[in-house]
């Protein structure tokens, strides 16, 4: 926003709207546009100190009274996050083009306070990434499922199924990854429903087998 300060001669009286400040050598008076009057004593800062203070205060703004948990961009769509345009016209021959090493497994998952994308880089730390392991914690309704869906969709749109596959484990009855089983990247969607209980055991066996395989490779 813009703050306009109008300096007028001391003999000018009458309400001019907004906040009025009358400064005397030993006192000052503030009068709001609603007729509230406050009396005080001026600090009598030097010009240099006043300028320094003004520069420190310039970036600050009065609170709007909104909820601190209010989304930064309430209408942000997934396609906006990746600059894809119309979802119906996404050209995977363009989005699946080979990515540089720096951009591999690196996708936006939201926006920061300044509106710039917040990136998640799943590469190993040795490859200047954040690592493939993580923990997402939040209360019911805080957006954990939306974060996971955004992550999976972002990776699927920007990486070909020949280079990236998913096994999606969803113990909320399959609601988190609903509709994603048809993506070419998805090898399986495992849920806690009765029909999928055998897959849960198979997933545990597969993970254990993969861990053993990697340990043997590192040993050799």
Image (spheres, grey):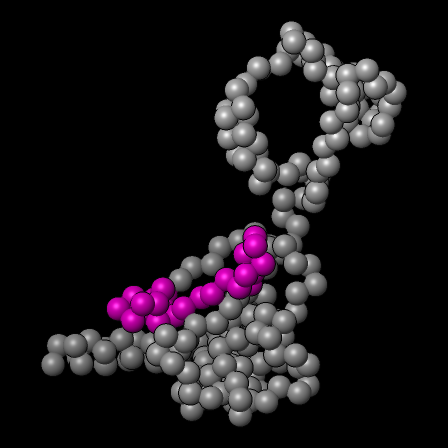
Q: How many marks?
A: 0
**Where 39 falls versus 116 (above or below)?**
above
Could you tell me if residue 174 is visible in this image?
no
What percent of the width, then of the height, locates residue 168?
48, 76
Could you tell me if residue 215 is visible in this image?
yes
What percent of the width, then of the height, locates residue 20?
77, 23
What percent of the width, then of the height, locates residue 24?
69, 11
- Residue range corresponding to the magenta coloring: 110-133
Horizontal placement of 104 versus 22: left or right? left
Frontmost residue, 140 versus 183: 183
Horizontal placement of 14 versus 98: left or right? right
Horizontal placement of 121 versus 41: left or right? left
Q: Which image quadrant for residue 180?
A: bottom right
Frontmost residue, 220 versus 48: 48
**Where 166 falls versus 123 (above or below)?**
below
Q: Which image quadrant for residue 29?
A: top right
Magenta residue check for 120: yes
């Amino acid at each position: 926003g813009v703050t306009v300060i109008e300096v007028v001669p001391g003999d000018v009286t009458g309400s001019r709207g907004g906040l009025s400040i009358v400064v005397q050598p030993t006192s000052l008076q503030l009068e709001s546009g609603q007729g509230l009057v406050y009396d005080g004593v001026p600090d009598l800062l030097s010009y240099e100190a006043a300028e320094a203070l003004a520069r420190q205060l310039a970036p600050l703004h009065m609170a709007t009274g909104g909820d601190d948990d209010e989304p930064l961009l309430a209408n942000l769509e997934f396609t906006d996050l990746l600059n894809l345009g119309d979802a119906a016209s996404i050209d995977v021959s363009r989005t699946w083009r080979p990515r540089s090493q720096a951009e591999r497994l690196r996708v936006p998952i939201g926006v920061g306070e300044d509106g710039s994308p917040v990136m998640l880089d799943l590469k190993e730390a040795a490859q200047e990434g954040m690592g493939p392991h993580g923990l997402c914690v939040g209360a019911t309704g805080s957006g954990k499922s939306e974060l996971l869906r955004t992550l999976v969709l972002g990776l699927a749109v920007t990486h070909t199924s020949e280079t990236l596959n998913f096994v999606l484990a969803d113990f909320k009855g399959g609601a988190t990854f609903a509709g994603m089983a048809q993506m070419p990247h998805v090898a399986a969607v495992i849920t806690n429903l009765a029909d999928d209980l055998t897959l849960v055991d198979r997933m545990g066996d597969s993970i254990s087998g993969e861990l053993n395989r990697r340990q043997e490779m590192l040993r050799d």
